[in-house]
Amino acid sequence: FNLPIWISSMTGGTEWAKTININLAKAANEFGLGMGLGSCRSLLYNDDRLSDFAVRSFIGDQPLYANLGIAQLEELVVENKYNVLKELVKKLEADGLIIHVNPLQEGMQPEGDLIKTAPIDTIRRLIDHLDIPLIVKEVGQGMGYRSLELLLKLPLTAVDFAAHGGTNFTKLELLRSDDPASLDALTRVGHSAEEMVNMVNQISEELGDSMQCKQIIISGGVKDFLDGYYLMSTLKTPSVYGQAGAFLQNARGEYEVLRQFVLSQKKGLEMAYAFLQVK
């Protein structure tokens, strides 16, 4: 990384996916960022949408990760189809896989998948059978103390907060239901990025050498470089900050628009590191 910024996963099978992903990959290459692809579920058994995600030639040697939801991964684990995951990462020329843990989102979807196994057990089996880097990410609610503690004990490449405060995918799914008001209270469940930073600081002190995962992507409600600077400075574990919506707004047209956005982030971070101190 030349800038401590992670382009968070945001596109799946949308008509804009190819344009967006190519623009994002170009920015990651030019400025030295990392990037997570949107949901790669559509690529599991056919390559019809492969061109929407095949951005290795644009991103160069920068980190590039595929991603799948925990429900799909649970199904593949039960069926012992680890080779399907290896092939997915190989054909995308990705560096690893992001595991999206989203039980609340799935529960709110009218057509959502029922998660039958505790995600931590599925994650452990993936670690045992896949010799590829893995990142575990929540999807808009964040994770509590116990979940973070269990994950940080595992040999993961990183944990991505995806904290409460950014896009609330649970609320979006609930709005698609026939009675959105009945379960609205659940859309307020979760932890902010700052709360999770404090949790990880406490957990790292308690775990000591038994903390195997030592890299964090701070995302979820990170509005700008100043939020990112503050949270990274507060966290005692090596980290970058992740954004999705802000990148998405600037990635659907000409690349120069996105380039200017990243330049502003770069300048802001340089000024923050030069003149500000978090106490």
Image (tube, rainbow, N blue to C red):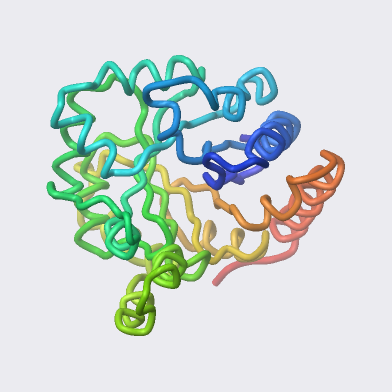
Q: Residue at x 57, y 63 (%)?
A: 222
Q: Residue at x 17, y 26 (%)?
A: 128
For residue 160, side relative to residue 120 (left or right): right
Q: Residue at x 76, y 47 (%)?
A: 262
> From the image, which quarter does the C terminus lie in?
bottom right
**Residue 6, position in %: x, y?**
57, 44
Work out whether residue 88 or residue 235 is closer to the camera in this orientation and state it. Answer: 88
Work out whether residue 214 or residue 279 is closer to the camera in this orientation and state it. Answer: 214
Q: Is residue 211 above or below residue 219?
A: above
**Residue 8, position in %: x, y?**
54, 47
| Location of residue 275 (image quadrant) | bottom right
**Residue at the extreme front of the image, as rendered:** 178
Q: Residue at x 18, y 30 (%)?
A: 77
Total numbered labels placed on residues in the image:
0
| Location of residue 169 (image quadrant) | bottom left
For residue 28, side relative to residue 97 (left or right): right
Q: Is residue 215 above or below residue 22?
A: below
**Residue 274, position in %: x, y?**
74, 57
| Location of residue 17 (image quadrant) | top right
> From the image, which quarter does the N terminus lie in?
top right
**Residue 96, position in %: x, y?**
42, 27
For residue 6, side relative to residue 226 (left or right): left
Work out whether residue 194 or residue 211 is closer to the camera in this orientation and state it. Answer: 194
